[in-house]
């Protein structure tokens, strides 16, 4: 077997064909698989067995950090470091601390959502073996691709013919 | 069955018209950016906008050299054009977030083809808004220590009990989150442009900007989660931003500002003004760039309806201001109201405001006006003027005559007040023109999901056929109260 083979890529014309093929790939026991499409397809998550991401949990803690930071900052500024009597209001006038804490909650949660998503996705990654297939540039346009990585424990010489049996337009070897 | 189709068309009008495939959608939108020839109107539009933007540059240079005295602000009208313009611009931004976030959460498919440039509009409007309060500080580089909490050599902190500091946090968070939301939406489309670009430089630039996006199913999964979470976070954010802007006024003691109706009334006004600006931008764009397949007449009608609804909330706000002033039984409140609408020197601005915001939108009740892009455009321009006048009325007429007649005074803008405002308009449209030229103005990947081919096994996620059946049977049965 070719040492530099990253995986086998199959091209499909429609989303339905790809999802059906992905279901068969999963049933055949492959785990190191991926699908590429020009838009999000919800059915593919189930077909490939993609688990729900932990991103929402991260975002929750990001927001919580922002909230604590906001409250902490304002309590520190107006109660600990520089208590200032403004019109006889209490030093811990918490209702007026709400807006800034709230905005910081949203800010940090938003940062976590975006950068957490990019981090979990392993982006930015300008190079990836699949880009070596010239027709892969259509994945961002109109075609659907299914990949089985050579690192998959069930990957062998038969995999290519298995892919061809799923009814793709074309099957490509992806070189590393 | 064809009857069923008709009903389906009526309940769920198609959001993409014409025969499109994933490929043609990508080409049609992507080519605006990638094809070599730039249309003539672009040069004219950008040229004029860019020249007008020089007014802003000129005014800012003169302002920094001379100081705040070049503006007409003076006691008692210490807040004048800069704050009017700030509130006007930030309000315009709100429609972008409403379209991208709130309509996403409400699963409104029609947001898809207008969200991208509405978000761009938000960003540019917020950038213009931020110019005013920053420069209103006179020496922005010296203002940093009381605007942002950082340990400084003077050992003092910002005053977090002040709505003006809330504003700093709200607006900067809003600008940041809007930028992130917009950019995240752009990533898959930038990858499309990267894969289609022939020019080496653009291929490289879009490649860098798309961060190596390859459309992997796992990436899409997290991407959609992140997008939904951002929408969920932006929704309360956008409502909080204009509420906090309204606190700048409502927290003070001044008659005409000190009103509890302000937060919701400001938010509705912001969305109202923002939709007007979205219409002003998209009506010419869809004609010039031949985008009628994606920004259909249905889109315009929906936006007209949103404008009517939010406009009516704003008019309700005007009525409530009147009612509060009367019901409070406070002589200063009632005097302020009479001064605003009748006795005062600025009475004309109030009636102009009612004409622009209250009367003009009544035309939108009629199908003829709602369905005509020309009239929608005209009404949008009138509403934009009206919303500017609204802030003028709130700020100038409240300040010019307060409690003590001895401290009454008039306000007149100087030429620099005007050049600065007109300059930001130029700056805004220059940015819009640049955006239209270099980035996809419609979200390509989201439009792909609107095509029927995008539905796996022909199953349409949001289309409940049982609703159709009910409507169908309902249409076929005679009305129950029909005689004979």
Image: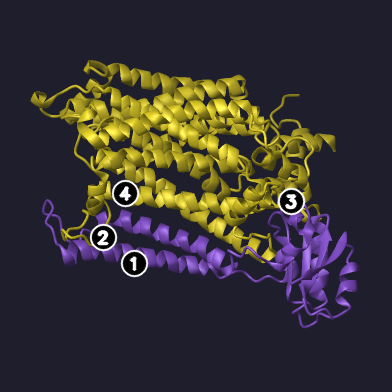
Mark closer to the chain start, 1 or 3: 1
Name the image quarter holding residue B34.
Answer: top right
Q: Chain of mark 2?
A: B
Query: Residue tagged by mark 2?
Result: B150
Q: Report the mark closest to the observer, 2 or 4.
A: 2
Front position in the image: B216 or B61: B61
Q: Is residue A57 left or right of residue B220?
A: left
Q: Chain of mark 1?
A: A
Q: Nearer the viewer, mark 3 or mark 4?
A: 3
* Residue occupied by mark 1: A68
Mark 2 or mark 4, which has the lower sequence index?
2
Under tag 1, what secondary structure?
helix
Spot occupied by residue A34 in the image (x, y as percentages of width and height): 73, 68
Assess whether mark 3 and mark 1 are in contact (beta carbons under 8 angstroms).
no
**How many neighbours does mark 2 have within 10 angstroms: few (below 14), some (14-19), or many (20 or more)?**
few
Q: CA distance from mark 3 to mark 2?
A: 47 Å
Q: Residue B129: in sight, yes or no?
A: yes
Q: Nearer the viewer, residue B232 or A161?
A: A161
Disc marking residue A133: none
Q: CA distance from mark 2 to mark 1?
A: 17 Å
Read off the residue under disc 4: B168
Residue under pointer 3: A141
Q: Nearer the viewer, residue B186 or B140?
A: B140
Judge depth for marks 4 and 1 and give the one in front: 4
Chain coloured purple in the rendered structure? A
């Amino acid at each position: 077997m070719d040492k530099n083979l990253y995986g086998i890529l199959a091209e499909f014309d429609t989303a339905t064909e790809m999802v059906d093929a992905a279901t068969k790939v999963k049933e055949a026991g492959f785990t190191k698989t991926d699908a590429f499409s020009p838009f999000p397809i919800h059915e593919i998550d189930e077909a490939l067995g993609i688990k729900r991401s932990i991103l929402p949990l991260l975002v929750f803690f990001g927001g919580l950090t922002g909230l604590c930071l906001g409250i902490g900052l304002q309590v520190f500024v107006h109660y600990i470091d520089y208590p200032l009597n403004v019109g006889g209001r209490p030093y811990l006038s918490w209702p007026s601390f709400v807006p800034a804490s709230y905005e910081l909650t949203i800010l940090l949660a938003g940062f976590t959502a975006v950068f957490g998503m990019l981090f979990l996705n392993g982006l930015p990654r300008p190079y990836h073996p699949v880009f070596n297939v010239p027709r892969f540039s259509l994945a961002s346009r109109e075609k659907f691709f299914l990949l089985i990585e050579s690192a998959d424990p069930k990957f062998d010489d038969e995999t290519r013919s298995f892919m061809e049996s799923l009814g793709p337009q074309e099957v490509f070897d992806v070189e590393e | 069955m064809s009857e069923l189709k008709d009903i389906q068309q009526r309940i769920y009008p198609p959001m993409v018209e014409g025969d499109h495939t994933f490929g043609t959608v990508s080409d049609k939108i992507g080519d605006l950016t990638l094809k070599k020839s730039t249309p003539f109107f672009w040069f004219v539009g950008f040229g004029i906008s860019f020249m007008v933007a020089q007014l802003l540059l000129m005014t800012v240079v003169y302002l920094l050299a001379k100081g705040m005295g070049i503006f007409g602000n003076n006691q008692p009208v210490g807040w004048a054009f800069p704050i009017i313009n700030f509130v006007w611009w930030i309000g315009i931004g709100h429609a972008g977030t409403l379209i991208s976030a709130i309509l996403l959460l409400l699963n409104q498919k029609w947001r898809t083809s207008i969200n991208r440039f509405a978000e761009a509009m938000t960003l540019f409007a917020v950038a213009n808004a931020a110019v005013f309060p920053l420069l209103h500080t006179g020496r922005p580089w010296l203002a940093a220590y009381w605007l942002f909490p950082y340990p400084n050599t003077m050992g003092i902190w910002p005053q977090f009990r002040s709505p003006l500091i809330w504003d700093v946090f709200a607006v900067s968070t809003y600008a940041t989150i809007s930028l992130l939301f917009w950019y995240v939406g752009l990533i898959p489309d930038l990858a499309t442009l990267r894969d289609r670009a022939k020019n080496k430089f653009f291929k490289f630039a879009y490649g860098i900007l798309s961060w190596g996006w390859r459309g992997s199913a796992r990436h899409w999964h997290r991407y959609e989660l992140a997008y939904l979470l951002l929408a969920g976070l932006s929704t309360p954010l956008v409502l909080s931003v204009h509420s906090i802007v309204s606190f700048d006024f409502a927290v003070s003691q001044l008659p005409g500002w000190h009103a509890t109706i302000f937060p919701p009334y400001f938010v509705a006004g912001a969305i109202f003004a923002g939709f007007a600006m979205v219409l002003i931008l998209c009506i010419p764009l869809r004609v010039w760039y031949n985008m009628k397949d994606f920004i259909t007449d249905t889109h315009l009608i929906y936006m007209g309806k949103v404008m009517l609804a939010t406009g009516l909330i704003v008019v309700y706000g005007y009525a409530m201001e009147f009612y509060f002033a009367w019901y409070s039984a406070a002589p200063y409140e009632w005097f302020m109201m009479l001064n605003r609408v009748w006795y005062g020197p600025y009475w004309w601005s109030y009636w102009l405001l009612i004409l622009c915001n209250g009367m003009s939108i009544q035309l939108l009740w009629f199908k003829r006006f709602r369905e005509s892009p020309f009239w929608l455009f005209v009404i949008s321009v009138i509403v934009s003027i009206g919303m500017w006048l609204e802030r003028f009325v709130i700020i100038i007429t409240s300040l010019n005559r307060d409690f003590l007649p001895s401290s009454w005074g008039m306000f007149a803008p100087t030429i620099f007040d005007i050049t600065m405002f007109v300059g930001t308009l130029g700056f805004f449209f220059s940015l819009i023109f640049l955006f239209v030229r270099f980035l996809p103005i419609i979200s390509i990947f989201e439009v792909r999901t609107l095509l029927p081919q995008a539905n796996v096994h022909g199953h349409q996620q949001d289309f409940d056929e049982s609703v159709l059946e009910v409507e169908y049977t309902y249409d076929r049965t005679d009305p129950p109260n029909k005689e004979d």
